[in-house]
Amino acid sequence: MMEKELGKILIIDDDEDVLFAAKMLLKKYAQEVIIEKNPKKIPFLMNNDTYDVIMLDMNFSKDITSGKEGFYWLDQILERDPQAVVVLITAFGDVEMAVKALKEGATDFVLKPWQNEKLLATLSTAVKLKKSYNQVDQLKSEKKQLEEEINQPFKDIIGDSEAIKSVFKIIDKVAQTDANILILGENGTGKELISRAIHMKSMRKDNVFVGVDMGAITETLFESELFGHKKGAFTDAKEDRKGRFEIANKGTLFLDEIGNLSMPLQSKLLTAIQNRQVTPIGSNKIQNIDIRLICATNMPLYEMVEDSTFRQDLLYRINTVELRLPALRERIEDIPLLADHFIKTYSKKYRKSGKKISSAAIKKLQKYHWPGNIRELQHAIERAVIMSDENSLMPEDFFFLNHKTGEDGNILEETFNLDEVEKNIIQKAIDRNQGNISRAAKELGLTRASLYRRLEKHGL
């Protein structure tokens, strides 16, 4: 045992020989050993200090063998500190008394005279238990603090526009229910942020939030990732693994980019959602699941249903409530607030205090089309903070935004990069046809499938 491993120990026994013998043994291994002959001083000692372990005699002078006094003082200790780690000691112990002591809340039980090695081992285990209690308390405290910050109404969702306020109203209405929610919106509009806000305002907020990027899961790993597998179920299954559905049990499961799933995978997902059950690969045991389901996509699911590329019954299952997030160009009045937030964030990160943004730069940002939405604005601000040597960000600090908006609202091209030109033309067509993929594809001279591939390629 390492020196000072045992922390602070309080020993209460009416036998002075026992007290001094224990102190002589333990002072090498404990940071501090406090001894006390009179148990009536326990309240005072506990009110004025904390201890990693309390060693408590079972029998004092009034009652030599029954252990009643020991049990009385054990109750007093645990009343003051329910997580106190108490090791009871007695010269007249037996199995029945030991069992009763453990039921009453003692951590362990040792007999006098003790074997030094055994006593040290017992106290070492007791100290580890106390440390685990402290760690749990610390985690609970941190979790509570984090939740207090998170639970400030829409703390991380920045904006004051009517468009974002309408989103807040819907969140307030649906969060307390267990209704399945479908979040629609372009890439970069904050779909995962909104889903977390719904979770934190729901009755499941004390349980886990599990997010899954469906677009990143391959066909072969789909069932393993979502439903889990048993060891040996396939070549690389070297150990049991819980699926995301089981991990999210009692909490919220967020399935992002659900529109990217193939029809066979949609069928498997629908079965799990309908039955609220999953079966890990390699197992015959059905796992019941209790989740709040939130899905999100930037794909036009209703048109995909018409094209038979997305199951209608799955769409009905996931969109009890539908929430559409506005694009940044639809809430340009929020750009000053967002820009200020990101400037503060990256000024702190890159140690460039005092950074602000000029009104001229704000006007430039508000004229830009933002095909990448808030995520693109965030990256633009980060780059400008890094590159600018002045305290105030100016329009020229955003020279890398290659597009300007003309008086008619259309994007004016300032690039000869073919990918950028294609991306902007597609965006124009989508906007001009109010998001109708079929009409946009026809105007562009493309099939719907070809347009979908280009939308995915450009992150639109």
Image (tube, helix red, strand yellow):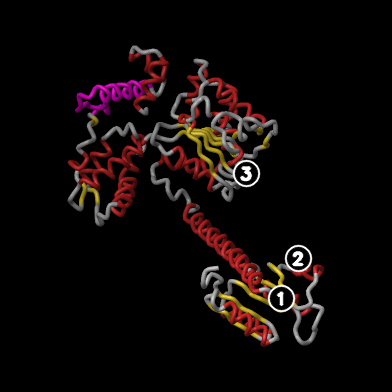
Q: Which residue is the site of mark 3?
A: 250
Q: Which residue is the site of mark 1?
A: 89
Q: Residue at x 69, y 31 (%)?
A: 284
Q: Is residue 116 visible?
A: yes
Task: Say if the magenta span includes residue 143.
Answer: no
Q: Please, what is the three-letter code of the amino acid marked with disc 1?
A: Ile
What is the quadrant of residue 368 in the picture? top left
Q: Give the percent coordinates (x, y) of residue 216.
A: 46, 31
Q: Quadrant of the C terminus?
A: top left
In this rendered view, identify the residue nearer to me: 182 or 162: 182
Q: Residue at x 62, y 41 (%)?
A: 249
Relative to 177, residue 296 above or below: above
Relative to 306, residue 331 above or below: below
User: Which of the marked residues, 3 or 1, is nearer the chain's N terminus?
Assistant: 1
Q: What's the distance in space between the residues labelled 1 and 2, CA to CA?
A: 15 Å
Q: Residue at x 30, y 54 (%)?
A: 348
Task: Indicate the secondary structure of the residue bearing disc 3.
Answer: loop
Q: Which residue is the site of mark 2?
A: 103
Q: For marks 3 and 1, give the one nearer the viewer.
A: 1
